[in-house]
Amino acid sequence: MIDCRVKIMELKTAIVVSCWFTVAIVSSVYMLVFGREIDVMFGVLLPIGFLILIALIVTFMVLSSTESNQNPKNN
């Protein structure tokens, strides 16, 4: 039972870390490519802000999900 919980927490951690790692890479490349060519507020900060918002939503959804659906109670 404990081993299953550890694996679930490792999976959740991997999902959150990969999400934030992807946001960091996409944001960096986006700023390098489009940073000088388009308007800073609507062309760079707004899309990156939306990426960070989505990453926050994914983080809270993954970390707050309950394990009751994954581990049935033993009777």
Image (tube, rainbow, N blue to C red):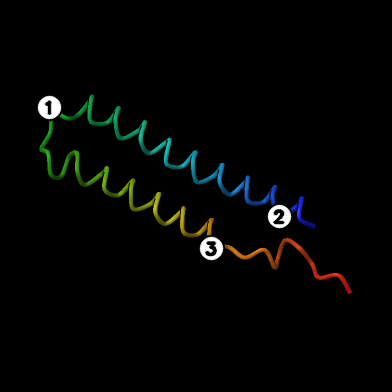
Q: Position of residue 42 (x, y in %)?
A: 15, 44
Q: Which mark is residue 64?
A: 3
Tell me the residue at 67%/51% (across/down): 8
Question: Looking at this view, is 36 or 2 the one in front?
Answer: 2
State which quadrant residue 72 falls in. bottom right
Distance of label 2 from label 3 (alpha carbons): 14 Å
Q: Position of residue 31 (x, y in %)?
A: 23, 30
Q: Is residue 34 above or below residue 52?
A: above
Q: Which mark is residue 5?
A: 2
State the quadrant of the N terminus: bottom right
Tell me the residue at 35%/33% (across/down): 26
State which quadrant residue 57 falls in. bottom left
Q: Which mark is residue 25?
A: none
Q: Position of residue 45 (x, y in %)?
A: 19, 43
Q: Is residue 52 left or right of residue 62?
A: left
Mark 1 vs mark 3: give the one in front. Answer: 3
Does dot 1 land on a helix, a strand or a loop? loop
Q: Position of residue 70 (x, y in %)?
A: 72, 61
Does dot 2 land on a helix, a strand or a loop? helix
Amino acid under disc 3 = Ser
Residues tagged 2 and 3 counted as in contact (Cβ below 8 A): no
Q: Which residue is mark 1?
A: 36
Q: Is residue 63 above or below residue 32?
A: below
Mark 1 vs mark 2: give the one in front. Answer: 2
Amino acid under disc 1 = Arg
Amino acid under disc 2 = Arg
